[in-house]
Image (cartoon, rainbow, N blue to C red):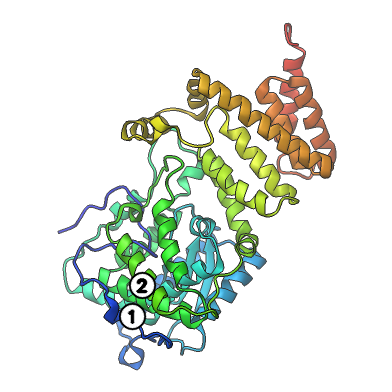
Amino acid sequence: MRVRIPALVLLGFCPLLFPQQAPSIGAAALPGAGSVQVPGGPGPAFAFTKIDTDLLDEANAVDALYEKKGLVMHDPALQSFLDSVGNRVLANRPIPENVTFRFRALRDPMVNAFALPNGSIYVTTGLLALLENEAQLAGVLGHETSHVFERHTYLENRSVRRKALTINILEIAAAAAPVGGNLSEGVQLFGASVQLAAMIGSDIIVATIYGYSRDMERQADSDGIAAMTAASYDPAAMARSFELLDLDSSLEYEPVQGFYRDHPKLSERREFATQFASEHKSGALVTGDPKAYLDNVSPAICYEIETDLSSRRERTAVDRASKLSAAFPDNPKYKVLLADSYRALGAKTKAPTDEERTRHGQAEHRKEYFSMTPEEEQSKLREKPEGQAALRDNQAMAEQLYKSVIQSNPNYAAAHSGLGFLFEQEGKYNEAATEYQTYLQMESGTSMDHLRIQRRLAAVQKLAGSPGHT
């Protein structure tokens, strides 16, 4: 019998896929205070079979497909950071047979992390943008590497081959794919890792991207928090990660929402991590500087902001860009991204209204998301006084940010094009033309946006010269 998976996104790092019950984690499961032993998996007791080598080949094929489709983010600084944290969590444990640990950032807004049995550990840009510090990332990597050490994918595969498979691979892939007539490319990127894996991987490969059995997830939690603590990271950071996962849907409707946010066992896992942390208090344990973390993962956050802006998640874009700009106020790129986010926000309030937070309001927002274009949504918002006020405030904030960048970095071309878009949005066509011309002069035909800005310039010049225009 197959169980239909609802149209939700699960999290390999947090949710639990199978519904069977397991005993709760109590104090007896915690390592003793003062010493942390990190399990190394079944070791020589695990012997490869033909079934296992076939699964290994599939995992390698998924790696190759992610690379071919451009999902793997190849930023040297970000990669160096992932490798540094990942190798610190691995420490000196013997590497299992047929495993090469690789830590990779995956272009996918779906908040997720997962491990393939060959040792490839993927953390999505959505999760990297959500976390706050290095220790939280260490907890994620500790959890995922534990799945590899414990051979969970192979054991799960052997198990499901002896009984009826409970997952339909096509339904899983469909669950990760947003539906609707007005969806942009940015929206379609949600769950891209699952959809691509479903193209060539077996049911079990796709299933492990979602998560393992509860017993295996508990074991990965226990082994992972031990590994991060042994690497001198504060285990309390794992508990905080669970809190962030629980909170990360408060700003607006998401085209694909994670199952983990409503999972009843998330609080239990947070309690386990909190209890473990209380048993292992030490002044030598670190969390890492939040500003340094933002700096290291900024390529992933910037990618997420751009995806947010093309996915009608303007509030999330403002929130993320605000964090970057506040941490690095002299960085013109972050300030322009923040200005772009306020400009895209338009007549939408920065925070959800009380009505939007109600169940009825959320249902209406969801319906409008799929039935309206962005222009139609903005037009409807402008019909209300609060929408008109929000539009004035957001445009004023965007203009202030663009001009502050131009004042300190007059040759920063992106600020001029952004200001041109804003002026055009406001109907200030002469001013828009001036900014577009400045941008084109600076770029000298080298920008990918050159042709688009040329067309915008021609359009605003025509509008500026139309009868009745002031």
Residue 113 showing in the rendered view = no
Residue occupied by mark 1: 30
Residue extending furthest toward the left:
1
On-image quarter of the C terminus: top right
Q: Quadrant of residue 404?
A: top right
Which amino acid is tagged 2?
Gln
Residue 25 showing in the rendered view = yes
The kind of secondary structure element at disc 1 is loop
Vertical side of 111 occupied by 63: above or below: below
Whole-percent x and y of residue 324? 64, 52
Q: Residues within 10 Å of mark 1 (few under 14, many from 20)?
A: some
Vertical side of 351 occupied by 160: above or below: below
Whole-percent x and y of residue 272? 33, 70
The answer to whether residue 156 is left or right of residue 376 is left
Q: Residue at x 50, y 40 (%)?
A: 313
Residue occupied by mark 2: 275
Whole-percent x and y of residue 220? 36, 74
Mark 1 vs 2, N-terminal side: 1
Do residues under tags 1 and 2 come within 8 Å of each other at their CB atoms? yes
Q: Quadrant of residue 426?
A: top right
Which amino acid is tagged 1?
Leu
Cα distance between the residues tagged 1 and 2? 8 Å
Q: Residue at x 73, y 37 (%)?
A: 402
On-image quarter of the N terminus: bottom left
Q: Residue at x 71, y 43 (%)?
A: 448
- How many discs mark residues in the rendered view? 2
Q: Nearer the viewer, residue 30 or 405?
A: 30
Q: Nearer the viewer, residue 355 or 348?
A: 355
Q: Quadrant of residue 61?
A: bottom left
> Which mark, residue 177?
none
